[in-house]
Image (spheres, helix red, strand yellow):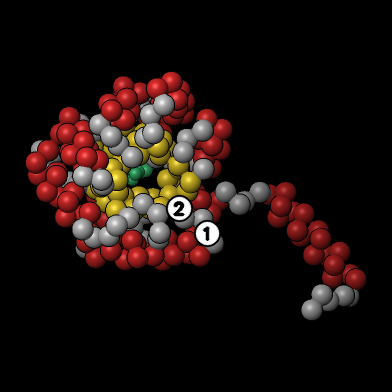
Amino acid sequence: MKFFVDTAEIDAIAELNDLGMVDGVTTNPSLIMKSGRDIIEVTKEICALVDGPVSAEVVATEADAMIEEGLKLAEIAENIAIKVPLTWAGLKACKAFSERGHMVNVTLCFSANQALLAAKAGASFISPFIGRLDDVNLDGMELISDIRQIYDNYDFQTEILAASIRTVNHVTESALIGADVITAPPGVIKKLADHPLTDKGLEAFLADWAKTGQKIV
Ligand code: E4P
């Protein structure tokens, strides 16, 4: 399973990238706003830091304008995945980008039928938003599972990018279902290493080690 980091904060990306935990990055207009940076400048820095796909999102709502924006974003670097919303205009732009050989991430997916359309439009990634479905008392993981089954039934090559991940359990469940990628905030990725029994066990080992009076180096 690939790990994408869901942020536009360069330091956080760099820290996880140094640990070999970053297969790609996703951004969106809200994350760009939070970074306080210019979209072109910050995206260029992210693309230089990370080898894998870096999603940069269009903000136009009409297909022609989306295509114009997406082509400008694609000029930033080879590893740009143009991110478009799951609307008919977004699907039209997706088809145009994929025919030109660009990676496309279709975002704001909340149903299996939407995911089916994205695959047919040539999306490289489909982004079902787990957390936002959970927020309205729907089952985000059920959606991931449905899309997995549909894509496998027809051998669609579009990768399932489980998005809007809020908890470590979302990561586990996405992996069990077979999502190709998760994108999560740096804080969630860091929490994956946490376990109270690891902390307790380490404390006990270190206490016993101190009693030996030994040193390894
Ligand atoms: C994914 O590409 C989105 O940027 C992101 O996962 C949305 O997450 P949120 O619902 O926590 O804002």
Label 2 crowd bin: few (<14), some (14–19), many (20+), radius 10 Å: some
Residue occupying the far right of the picture: 212
Of residues 178 and 30, which is closer to you in this image?
178
Image quadrant where residue 105 sits: top left
Return the residue at label 1.
20
| Above/below status of 40 relative to 161 | below
Position of residue 95 measured from the top left corner of the image (x, y, whole percent): 21, 36
Give the CA distance from mark 2 to mark 1: 8 Å
Position of residue 201 measured from the top left corner of the image (x, y, whole percent): 77, 54
Report whether residue 28 is seen: no
In the image, what residue occupies the spot 31% across and 30% down?
A: 119
Label 1: state its secondary structure: loop
Of residues 111 and 104, which is closer to you in this image?
104
| Above/below status of 217 relative to 90 | below
The amino acid at mark 2 is Asp
Q: Is residue 61 left or right of residue 52?
A: left
Of residues 149 and 110, which is closer to you in this image?
149
Report whether residue 159 is seen: yes
Q: Quadrant of ligand 1?
A: top left
Position of residue 31 measured from the top left corner of the image (x, y, whole percent): 30, 53
Position of residue 10 measured from the top left corner of the image (x, y, whole percent): 37, 64
Image quadrant where residue 52 sits: bottom left
The amino acid at mark 1 is Gly
| Above/below status of 60 relative to 210 | above
In the image, what residue occupies the spot 75% across and 58% down?
A: 202
Q: Is the CB of the residue bearing disc 2 within 8 angstroms of ligand 1?
A: no
Q: Quadrant of the C terminus?
A: bottom right
Q: Is residue 206 left or right of residue 116?
A: right
Return the residue at label 2.
23
